[in-house]
Image (tube, grey):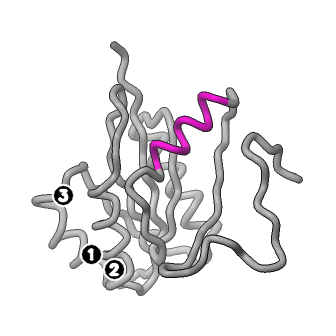
Amino acid sequence: MDTSRLAVCVPTYQRSHMLRDCLLSLEKLHIPQGFEVYVIVVDNDEQGQTKTIIDELSENFCFPLYYFIEAERGLASVRNRILEEALASNADLLAFIDDDEQAEPRWLEQHLKALEKHRAVVSCGPVRPIGANLEVKGKKPLVDGSRPRH
């Protein structure tokens, strides 16, 4: 059976406590058979303040955890660096989550199912604040299998 390499990608900037919570939520993910998961964190802070979180968690973390600093400011620069590192590590699939988010246990599994079901190359879903009602006022949820506007 072939194994797909899946990189969970986390951009971060000066939010150590949020990054810790985000990474800890990844440890609870349900991973379908046939996937090798690892985590890439790219820090946009030249001082690398969040490195202490990576050092603290990496020894007992359930997935390989890689940390890089991107000195050029801006989210686009961080995302481009993530893509460079993912390509260098031979990732087959990428999943993005921000440092101020937490993944539900079936987050990754549901995206992988959507990719397969719709023969899609991209899957995206809503980001809900913790403890918030699932319905966002004034905005209708997209129908499963919808095509993006752009």
Disc 1 to disc 3, C-alpha distance: 14 Å
In this view, the residue in front, 76 or 57, is 57
Q: Which residue is mark 1?
A: 51
**Vertical comparison of 9 with 120: above or below:** below
Q: Nearer the viewer, mark 1 or mark 3?
A: 3
Disc 2 to disc 1, C-alpha distance: 5 Å
Q: Which residue is mark 2?
A: 48
- Kind of residue at badge 3: Phe
The residue at 33%/75% (across/down) is 21
Outermost residue toward the left?
A: 59
**Vertical comparison of 143 with 78: above or below:** above
Outermost residue toward the right?
A: 149
Question: What SS does tag 1 mark?
Answer: helix
Q: Position of residue 82 (x, y in %)?
A: 50, 56
Q: Which residue is mark 3?
A: 61
Question: What SS does tag 3 mark?
Answer: loop
Q: Which residues are magenta?
A: 108-117
- Kind of residue at badge 1: Lys
Disc 3 to disc 2, C-alpha distance: 20 Å
Q: Are marks 2 and 1 in contact (CB under 8 Å)?
A: yes
